[in-house]
Image: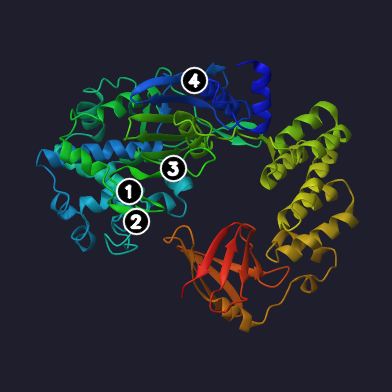
Amino acid sequence: MKTVFLGVFIVAGIVSYGQTKVNRLEKLISTYAEYGKFNGSVLVAEKGKVIYKKGFGLAEMEWNIPNQPDTKHRLGSITKQFSSMLIMQLVEQGKLKLDVPISTYLPDYPKKTGAIITIHHLLTHTSGIPNMTSFPGFLKNVSINAYTPEQLVNMSADSTLEFKPGERFAYSNSGYLLLGYIIEKVTGKSYEQVLRENILTPLKMNNTGYDHHELLLKNRASGYEKNGRQYVNAKFLDMSVPYAAGAMYSTVEDLYLWDQALYTNQLLRKENMELLFAKHIPSGGGHYGYGWGIGEIPLGNTAAKIETVGHGGGINGFNTQITRVLSDKSLIVLLNNTGGAPLNEMTNAIAAILYDKPYDLPKRSVAYSLADKIEKDGVPVALEYYKGVKDAAGYYLNEHEMNRTGYEFLQSGKMKEAAAIFKLNTEAFPKSSNVYDSYAEALMAMGNKTEAIENYKQSVKLNPGNVNGVKILKDNGINTDDLIKKVPVEYLKLLEGEYMNVDNKEWKIKFEVTDGILYGNDRGYKYKVLPVGGEGEFVNPDDGASLVFDTKDKKAITMVLFGRVRFKKVM
């Protein structure tokens, strides 16, 4: 196929079928890399055979060392499928049982919970044990220090269970830390040693292991986080903390060896292998097995779907995804070392290529392209450029990216450039409190106090919880009471009750009125809900999230969160 035709299809956002699958994979993933949306290693297998593997971007940015197929990445929660395999091997050997209380193996564990939680509960995230990584202060006070497995387990051992074991699914890293500890207690060996002896050595996964910060490890990628257009080193994490829930490293090539072994009985007998991928418990639109998610993924931009088993992982500076199609032994492995890449979106497009379905190429960020244009040609030229790309098919406009880009200029002393971006953001997202607050800050820095005050007023109207905006206005002698909308308590009482997400019945938010103020409770997170704008329009002042209630039918009240996530009142 000639290049000229390829260009036509790229503009349309769809890649032609005249290309080979490998060429389409190359174009897709290189475009993600070019747009700063992927930086890592990829492997794709079709019907058990590797058809594509490659590294993109840099494994080590300070030395310009590129990612390769043999680059070692931290896996995060992909580790859980290895822990579940070790548990099932011990079950097969008769050293563990899935359905007996964990106090059978941990006599010192608190009896109140240890007597009712089983290994099955831990494997399926149905134990009710609170997720340790969600504890207040975890990142600051826990993640940077070294702990023994026993110390990790004890952090949540005395916690009150969130629900009766087996009642429902709630993802819990604490449960898998506990599984690692049980492995050590039953075998008398470290988790790392059992992992090496029972899985890695038999499968010749020589580039996989349990990571340690002090370990000198050849071809190890460094972890980064993206801050706007810039990258920064990821925060330190002591690898003793993720332990059996997330402490492994590997390569895309070694994960292919792992994938292939799972089609055999080298590690487990058939009946026990099947338990790994059984649909044990519903979990957010799919099911959870033992260390694996089971569900369907869309094929590109079509309505077609295919059933997969897989798991994602996220750990400081890394996010990862392994997706297996058991029906024909296809495999997609994505290991990224710059934090939050859109791996699900990439996986869906790659799957579309494998099954000859249409898909969209990624779009370029308007915010980052605008910033590049400002730096190259100045504000006037960039503003004209913006008009041409803000609604273009190959671009997308994101409020938060625009805001971050504005602050990138503001923090480097380029007030005029920052103000130009913030102003565009107020025009594009006129219902966002934050965009007016940011624009006002830039105007104040430029000495334009009058216009800044007007923008602070608009910000406070849209979010009465904007403490900074309220303070600045009061400091300038402005009464903010007139800016804040009042709603009758009777109307707020009408909104009280429990709301269920229409796409995920497990996601429920409860609203109640206390002292004339509406509060939301989202799975334990309690926040104020303040009225703004028109009838039924509210905001969470903590993060600026919008909530719009529709009470036209008082017997079927609905709520839309973030302008797109729909809920209906059920109680």
What kind of element bears circle 4? Answer: helix
Circle 3 sits in a helix, a strand or a loop, which is it? strand
Residue 305 marker: 3
Disc 4 + disc 3, Cβ < 8 Å? no
Colour theme: rainbow
Q: Earlier in the sequence, mark 4 or mark 3?
A: 4
- Left or right of 278: which side holds 146? right
Q: Position of residue 483 (x, y in %)?
A: 78, 70
The residue carrying mark 4 is 22
* Residue picked out by circle 2: 169
Which residue is the site of mark 1? Answer: 288
Q: Residues within 10 Å of mark 3 (few under 14, many from 20)?
A: some
The residue under label 2 is which amino acid type?
Phe
Which comes before the other along the chain, label 4 or label 1? 4
Q: If you read the primary sequence from the N terminus, does the residue marked by circle 2 or circle 4 appear first?
A: 4
CA separation, marks 4 and 1? 32 Å
Count of number-bearing discs:
4
Dots 2, 1 in contact, CB < 8 A: yes
- Taking the view exactly as shown, the residue that stands out farthest to the bottom is 490
Q: Which mark is residue 106?
A: none
- Identify the secondary structure beneath mark 1: strand
- Residue at 20 percent across and 44 percent down: it is 182
Classify 60 as above or below 387.
above
> Which amino acid, by three-letter code, is at mark 1?
Tyr
Q: Residue at x 49, y 20 (%)?
A: 22
Looking at the rendered structure, the kind of residue marked 4 is Val
Give the class, few, some or many, for how many residues have Cα within 10 Å of label 2's Cα (few <14, many ≥20). many
Q: Is residue 151 visible?
A: no
Q: What is the CA distance from the residue labelled 4 to the residue labelled 3?
A: 21 Å
**Residue lying at 32% horizontally and 56% vertically, measured from the top left:** 129
Q: Nearer the viewer, residue 268 or 128?
A: 268
Q: Earlier in the sequence, mark 3 or mark 1?
A: 1
